[in-house]
Image (cartoon, grey):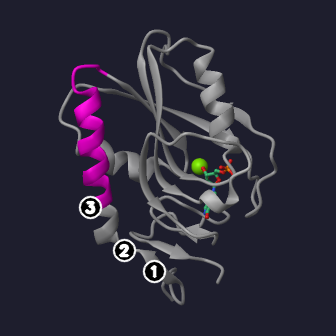
Amino acid sequence: MNTQEGLRVLVSSKVLASTVIRLAAEISRDYREKNPLLIGILTGSFVFMADLIRQLDFPLELDFVRLTSYGRSTQTSGCVKIVQGLRSLVKSRHVLVVEDIVDTGTTLAFLLDYLKKKKPASLKLCALLDKPSRRRVPVTIDYLGINVPDKFLVGYGLDCDEKYRNLPDIRVLEE
Ligand code: IMP
Ligand code: MG
């Protein structure tokens, strides 16, 4: 049985590819001369990050943080912790945070606040997906891919209990 059996496609791999190209064009325009530090949030953003950076043809550096807020369920716990920190210095760097999906905003608000205290030269956010109807904490998304409805989504890095990350498109887990 295929892992995606019975799950409706919300965003196809073709639409994901064109969205990544558009975002990369916007980011290139703003960061070409800045040697930015891209910070991905593990694990969900790794597929998006991998596709995004291969559309960026200028010098950049990469780092990842691992945060927890969800535990192993589909509901946010509201409490964010850094489980694996940065290896790079953030001070005076042009930092672009790369995230798979902004839901309540709790995770991003925490991370952006944490990074701001390290005095970067600039700090912006790129998110592939946004679920604005679920927002509890305001977050400014500087580079946004696609607005999505309030459904639990899997694929293209997004998981449910660590499964489905390998799907090439984004699918709805619970209808
Ligand atoms: P927030 O702190 O509520 O904004 O949650 C953000 C994090 O929750 C994202 O980085 C995802 O890892 C996870 N998340 C939110 N919505 C979904 C979803 O629909 N599918 C899978 N993970 C999700
Ligand atoms: Mg995440």
Q: Which residues are magenta?
A: 18-35
Viewer-proximal residue among 61 and 150: 150
Q: Residue at (39%, 45%) from the top-left corner? A: 49
Quarter-of-image position of residue 106: top right
Residue 12: assigned label:
2
* Disc 2 + disc 3, Cβ < 8 Å: no
User: As shown in the figure, which amino acid type bears the numbered disc 2?
Assistant: Ser
Q: Position of residue 130 (x, y in %)?
A: 54, 56
Viewer-proximal residue among 127 and 68: 127
Q: In the image, is residue 164 above or below residue 25?
A: below
Task: Work out how far the residue at label 3 is from the one at label 1, CA to CA, in angstroms.
Answer: 16 Å
User: As shown in the figure, which amino acid type bears the numbered disc 1?
Assistant: Val
Q: Which residue is tagged 3? A: 18
User: As shown in the figure, which amino acid type bears the numbered disc 3?
Assistant: Ser
Tell me: 54 left or right of 173: left
Task: Work out how far the residue at label 2 is from the one at label 3, CA to CA, in angstroms.
Answer: 10 Å
Task: Work out how far the residue at label 2 is from the one at label 1, CA to CA, in angstroms.
Answer: 6 Å
Q: Is residue 162 in view from this perspective?
A: no
Q: Residues within 10 Å of mark 3 (few under 14, many from 20)?
A: few
* Disc 2 + disc 1, Cβ < 8 Å: yes
Mark 1, secondary structure of its residue: strand
Tell how many labels. Answer: 3
Q: Which residue is tagged 1? A: 9
Q: Position of residue 19 (x, y in %)?
A: 32, 58
Q: Is residue 170 in view from this perspective?
A: yes
Q: Residues within 10 Å of mark 2 (few under 14, many from 20)?
A: few
Quadrant of the drawing holding the C terminus: bottom right
Q: Residue at (28%, 70%) from the top-left corner? A: 14
Mark 2, secondary structure of its residue: loop
